[in-house]
Image (cartoon, rainbow, N blue to C red):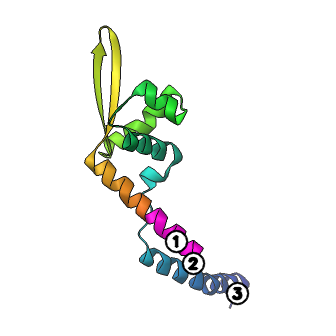
Amino acid sequence: MAKSALKTSTRRQAAAPRELRSARASAAAPPLDRLIHERMRLGIVSALAANESLTFSDLKGLVESTDGNLSVHARKLEDAGYISCTKSFDGRVPKTEYKLTTAGRRALESYLNHMETLIHKMRNT
């Protein structure tokens, strides 16, 4: 057997237990909701869970974001159906208001339950 083939074969054998452990871990717990897990989006969803609705400016202040960054993350959450966005005018001033949807609240609850399970498992090991 050639040296490079031997190295590859050895690497595959060494990787197998790690892959098996990873498969067991993923079978034990569902994967995290990557959409909510990102820091800024988790902040947005959490802020909206604690408030009935928030204007763009209020939300921006709570999550300490720039206009552009908040817009991009809010759009991803809106596209997923986790938040709703209502645009209106207060006189001539545009007003954007966000609310957490039922799907967003369920996704946040699921995410929090997952995190609590992980924390509990870590503390008991």
Residue 124 badge: 2
Quadrant of res 27: bottom left
Q: Which residues are magenta?
A: 114-125
Percent position of residue 78, x then y:
33, 40
Give the SS element for disc 3. Answer: loop
Mark earlier in primary sequence (3, 2) = 3
Percent position of residue 33, x then y: 42, 57
101 to the left or right of 29: left
**Pointer 3: residues within 10 angstroms few (<14), some, or many (20+)?**
few
**93 lies left or right of 24:** left
Which residue is labeled 1 in the image?
120
Single out the mark in the foreground, 3 or 2: 2
Q: Are marks 2 and 1 in contact (CB under 8 Å)?
A: yes
- Amino acid on which the number 2 mark rests in the picture: Asn
Which quarter of the figure has residue 57?
top left
Determine the secondary structure under disc 1.
Answer: helix
Q: Is residue 108 above or below residue 11?
A: above
Spot occupied by residue 16 in the image (x, y as percentages of width and height)? 57, 84
